[in-house]
Amino acid sequence: MCDIPSCLTNVCVLYFAKSAELSGVREELLQVDTPINSQDLWTRLLGLRVLQGHVVLAVRHQYVAIDDQEALTLRDGDEVAVVPPLSGG
């Protein structure tokens, strides 16, 4: 973890369902400044704008709303999942 107010962190973004189709990959490595809020992180995920409001992010197995303005402290090597809506039956 970085002790300075802002530093670059490498995270692995995991895409599922429609987000994988739109991004063209199942996972990718991203380098981001941390802390970062989920909205700013979302803007780094190119091509997914049409999914906003239909997916959530998961960081360390905790759901994070995309419009959440609270800063996320990402750690080097964290996985960020783009989670599609859950459907019931």
Image (cartoon, rainbow, N blue to C red):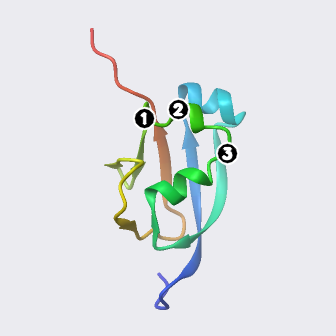
Q: Name the residue under label 2.
A: 51
- The residue located at (52%, 32%) in the rendering is 51
Q: In this view, does 46 lie to the left or right of 5?
A: right
Looking at the image, is mark 3 or mark 2 earlier in the sequence? 3
Image coordinates for residue 88, horizontal then vertical, percent: 28, 14
Of 40 and 11, nearer the camera is 40
Looking at the image, is mark 1 or mark 3 earlier in the sequence? 3
At mark 1, the secondary structure is loop
For the residues marked 2 and 1, what is the alpha-carbon distance in whole angstroms? Answer: 6 Å
Crowding at dot 1, Cα within 10 Å, few <14 / some 14-19 / many 20+, comes out as few
Of 86 and 71, nearer the camera is 71
The residue furthest right is: 24
- The residue located at (67%, 49%) in the rendering is 28
Q: Mark 1 points at which residue?
A: 53
Crowding at dot 2, Cα within 10 Å, few <14 / some 14-19 / many 20+, comes out as some
Q: Name the residue under label 3.
A: 46
Quarter of the image with the C terminus in it? top left
Q: How many labels does the image show?
A: 3
Q: In this view, does 45 lie to the left or right of 36?
A: right
Tell me the amino acid under the disc marked 2: Leu
Q: Is residue 22 left or right of residue 65?
A: right
Q: In this view, does 28 lie to the left or right of 88?
A: right
Tell me the amino acid under the disc marked 1: Gly
Determine contact: label 2, label 1, CB under 8 Å.
Answer: yes
Image coordinates for residue 40, horizontal then vertical, percent: 52, 59
Image coordinates for residue 18, horizontal then vertical, percent: 57, 25
For the residues marked 3 and 2, what is the alpha-carbon distance in whole angstroms? Answer: 11 Å
- The residue located at (49%, 61%) in the rendering is 78
At mark 3, the secondary structure is loop
The residue furthest left is: 89
Residue 56 location, quadrant: top left
